[in-house]
Every structure is written in structure tokens, then in C-alpha cells.
Image: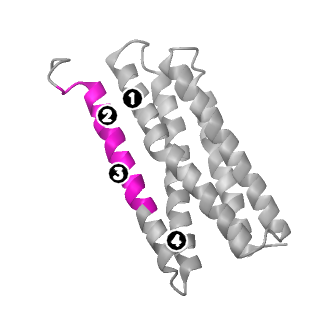
Amino acid sequence: MSPHDGSGPKDAGAKAKTRAFIALAVFLLILGGTYVLQPDDFFLYVKAFHVIAVMSWMAGLLYLPRLFIYHTDAEIGSDRSETFKMMERRLLKVIMNPAMMVSWVLGLYLAWDIYGFQGGWLHLKIAMVVGLTAVHMFFSRAVRDFAADRPRGAASYWRIWNEVPTILMIVIVILVIVKPF
């Protein structure tokens, strides 16, 4: 594999970025088309798209620390370490960042349009989503640290962090479904 034959990791990264951009553009076109057409059950479409975005974001938040756990065992500079760097970067940039943004935009729209930002459960839910966003930002920094071969932390450290998004997700789902207050 030559660096000049278009088959290197940078070319693969550019292709992945292009595919992600196309997928996001298609998703936004479908969402925009739904908004323009304004079917009677428009808010159900928004809810569905919100759930899809949240599922994608959560998949990344649950998988990225697992990659960190495996990455800590890879020798710095090894092919394995470089592969983990690429996987972490792509997961963050191609899936997690767009999914988080769409989750926030649609979630805030639903909070405003359906609930008028009323309800203690909603305020607590938004606080938990702010917590998820903080975890996302923390993981983003870790991706940069791993990419720069900075100190990694032990696998046990990342195993603990792997549980944080799960706990926040459980609280959020209970708040949304039960609406306890």
C-alpha cells in the first residue's frame, strides 16, 4: 500500500468523512422535508428523529470508553495503537458529535413545543443531558490525549468512566417515561 495510490489511512478517513457528511445531509433533508410538509403528527416525527439521534449518541458514549480500555493495553506507536486512534477519532467526529448536536436541537425543540419547558422532571432531564454532554466533552479530550500519546490512565479508570453514561441514561429514560414530578 503506497501513500500515493489513494489507499492509505488518510484516504480511508476522507472517504469515511464524506460518507458521514452525506448521511447527515440526507438525515437533515428528511427532517427538513418533514418540517416543510408539516404532517398532522409532525411532533411524532421529531420525537422519532430525536430518539434515533440519542441512540446513536449513546452508542458512541458507551463504546468509546471500551476503546480506551483496549487502547491502554496497546504499546504507544504500535500499529494497534494507531488503529485505536483512528477508530476513536472517527467514532467521535463521524457519529458522536453530529448525533449529540441533533439530539440537543430536537430535544430542545420538543421541550419548548410540547412541554413549554415546564415540569420538574424536564428540568432534571435537561440537567442529566448536560451531564452527558460534559462526559462527551471529557471523552473528546481523552481522544485528543490518546492521539497525542499523552498519559492514558489505567484500564480500570476507563471501566469506571464506562458506567457514567449508562447511569445518566437510566435516569433520563426513567424521567422521560415516568415523569415523576
Q: Main secondary structure of the magenta part?
A: helix
CA neighbours of label 3 inside 10 A, class few (<14), some (14 to 19), many (20+): few
Residue sitting at x 67%, y 47%: 132
Q: Is residue 175 left or right of residue 107?
A: right
- Which residue is tagged 4? 48
| Residue 120 percent coordinates (x, y) | 85, 67
Q: Residue at x 43, y 42 (%)?
A: 94
Q: Earlier in the sequence, mark 3 or mark 1?
A: 3
Q: Which residue is mark 3?
A: 22
Instruction: Identify the magenta region.
Output: 6-28
Q: Position of residue 72 (x, y in %)?
A: 50, 22
Q: Which residue is mark 1?
A: 86
Instruction: State the image quarter where residue 136 is shown.
Output: top right
- Distance from Cα at disc 4 to Cα at disc 2: 30 Å
Residue on which the image places disc 2: 14
Residue 93 appears left or right of 105? left
Q: Nearer the viewer, mark 3 or mark 1?
A: 3
Mark in front: 2 vs 1 = 2
Residue 181 vs residue 172: left or right?
A: right
Mark 3 or mark 4, which is nearer to you?
3
Q: Earlier in the sequence, mark 4 or mark 2?
A: 2
**Is 44 rendered above or below residue 83?**
below
Q: How is the image coloured?
A: one colour
Q: Amino acid at mark 1?
A: Met
The numbered disc on residue 113 is none
Of the numbered discs 2 and 3, the one sitting upstream in the chain is 2
The numbered mark, 4 or 1, whose residue comes first in the sequence reads 4
Q: Give the crowd class for mark 2: few <14, some 14-19, many >=20 residues within 10 Å.
A: few
